[in-house]
Amino acid sequence: MSAEKFQVDQEELEKSIQLRISGELDLAAALTFRHALEAVVHRADKALILDVGQLRYMDSTGIGIVVSTLKIRDELKAPFTVINIPAGIKRLFDLTGISGFLNEGIEGSA
């Protein structure tokens, strides 16, 4: 069984910073994800967009990081949007109750 390597790609645009994550977000990938977020999460001058369209798996560690990011962005009154949410990840967000707190982009939009 081979796990898909977790990867973060960052693109800074005029009004936003977009992080595209792919692979499997679990305990082993958490440090990589946290480092990528630390560099941009406090940038209140730009919207933060998390594109999860290529994410194949997320565990409770990943959920915790998303919740922490949501809290920080809320305190800063800075936009945080999750886009291209696959059905399995959406179900996880729904089950954990965080869907109602996320600004969700429509799957397939960027």
Image (spheres, helix red, strand yellow):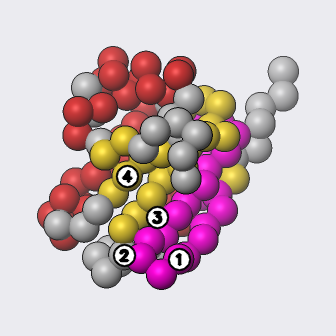
Residue appearing at x 22%, y 54% in the figure: 71
Residue corresponding to mark 2: 46
- Is 42 placed left or right of 60 in the picture? left
Which mark, by number, is residue 37? 3
Q: Earlier in the sequence, mark 1 or mark 3?
A: 1
Identity, as a three-letter code, of the amino acid under mark 1 = Leu
Q: Earlier in the sequence, mark 2 or mark 1?
A: 1
Which mark, by number, is residue 2? none
Is disc 4 surrounded by few (<14), some (14 to 19) or many (20+) residues within 10 Å?
A: some
Do tag 2 and tag 1 residues touch (Cβ < 8 Å)? yes
Magenta range is 8-32
Q: Is residue 63 above or below residue 44?
A: above
5 part of magenta stretch: no
Which mark, by number, is residue 81? 4
Do tag 4 and tag 3 residues touch (Cβ < 8 Å)? no
Identity, as a three-letter code, of the amino acid under mark 2 = Lys
Q: Earlier in the sequence, mark 4 or mark 3?
A: 3
17 part of magenta stretch: yes
Do tag 4 and tag 2 residues touch (Cβ < 8 Å)? no
Q: Earlier in the sequence, mark 3 or mark 2?
A: 3
Identity, as a three-letter code, of the amino acid under mark 3 = Leu
Q: Is residue 87 above or below residue 70?
A: above
Identity, as a three-letter code, of the amino acid under mark 4 = Thr
Q: Position of residue 108 (x, y in %)?
A: 58, 40
Residue corresponding to mark 1: 13
